[in-house]
Image (cartoon, rainbow, N blue to C red):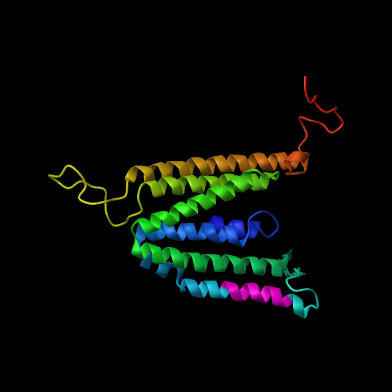
């Protein structure tokens, strides 16, 4: 959930935003629901999911209407710079709109996901498979970008996609421990495989450390080169040097 908020705020000026952040938040809620049950998730979010979606839709609409009162075209971004404790904080209607999108995605998609979890069975695994496919698509798109920040976000989303894929492969069931009863040779019923879950715990630690290393590396490169665009990082190919031969 914290990472989804980071992506939301990062998308204020950089790649990310309310839609991707909302999907990450929904993934966290869905996994939490699988582990502890739908009612636990409903108590945790406090409000009804559709009420959250409605609040987001209202916020996004207000963000667009504010521009009309300023006598500028609809959905034009407006900025103010209030000072809090001596620190200038930029606020804009763009951020309000992105927050509205975040809430709409969280409310609408979590409502669908929680309903599917209540039904259980193969239907939930099908939806998780589609979610994994979407995550892989977004990750590959970001990895093909020329911006280092986009590439880092792609690596993070790719790691989540792989973890969800392994998690889904181990079955999506709850309240059924994978323990063989005394005197039996096999499980009495379908249960979630504990091995993929253990692999995911290890993968989370490794992927987090790898992402932290890449983040520091990208920051050092930005400090030295003053850019995060790979086309402008020409240390190995200086601008004034002749181009390499096209053939031999």
Whether the magenta-drawn stretch holds residue 62 is answered as yes
Query: Is 182 positioned to the left or the right of 62 in the image?
Result: left
Q: How many labels does the image show?
A: 0
The residue positioned 43% from the left and 67% from the top of the image is 44
Query: Is 214 positioned to the left or the right of 28 in the image?
Result: right
- What is the x, y in percent for residue 108? 51, 68
**Residue 158 image-quadrant placement:** top right
**Residue 57 image-quadrant placement:** bottom right
**Relative vertical location of residue 109 with respect to residue 234 in this rendering, above or below:** below
Name of the residue lying farthest toward the right: 240
Q: Looking at this view, is 85 or 43 the one in front?
A: 43
Name of the residue lying farthest toward the top: 248
Answer yes or no: is residue 1 visible. no
Range covered by the magenta-colored residues:
56-66
- What is the x, y in percent for residue 169? 38, 46
Answer yes or no: is residue 101 visible. yes
- What is the x, y in percent for residue 71? 81, 78
- What is the x, y in percent for residue 58? 60, 76
Quadrant where the C terminus sits is top right
Q: Looking at this view, is 206 or 118 the one in front?
A: 118
The residue positioned 45% from the left and 72% from the top of the image is 46
Name of the residue lying farthest toward the left: 183
């Amino acid at each position: 959930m914290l990472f989804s908020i980071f992506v939301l705020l990062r998308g204020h000026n950089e790649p990310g935003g309310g839609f991707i952040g909302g999907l990450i938040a929904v993934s966290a809620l869905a996994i939490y629901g699988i582990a502890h049950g739908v009612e636990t998730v409903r108590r945790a979010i406090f409000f009804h999911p559709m009420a959250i979606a409605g609040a987001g839709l209202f916020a996004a609409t207000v963000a667009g209407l504010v521009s009309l009162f300023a006598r500028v075209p609809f959905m034009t971004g407006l900025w103010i710079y209030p000072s809090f404790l001596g620190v200038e904080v930029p606020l804009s209607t763009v951020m309000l709109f992105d927050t509205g999108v975040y809430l709409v995605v969280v409310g609408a998609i979590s409502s669908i996901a929680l309903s599917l979890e209540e039904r259980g069975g193969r239907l939930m695994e099908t939806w998780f498979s589609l979610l994994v496919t979407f995550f892989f698509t977004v990750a590959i798109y970001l990895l093909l970008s020329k911006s280092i920040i986009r590439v880092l976000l792609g690596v993070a989303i790719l790691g989540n996609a792989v973890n969800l894929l392994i998690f889904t492969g181990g079955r999506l069931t709850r309240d059924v421990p994978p323990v063989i009863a005394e005197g039996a040779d096999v499980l009495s019923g379908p249960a979630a495989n504990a091995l993929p879950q253990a692999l995911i715990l290890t993968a989370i630690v490794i992927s987090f450390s790898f992402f932290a290393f890449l983040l520091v590396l990208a920051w050092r490169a930005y400090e030295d080169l003053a850019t995060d665009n790979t086309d402008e990082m020409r240390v190995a190919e200086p601008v004034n040097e002749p181009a390499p031969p096209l053939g031999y």
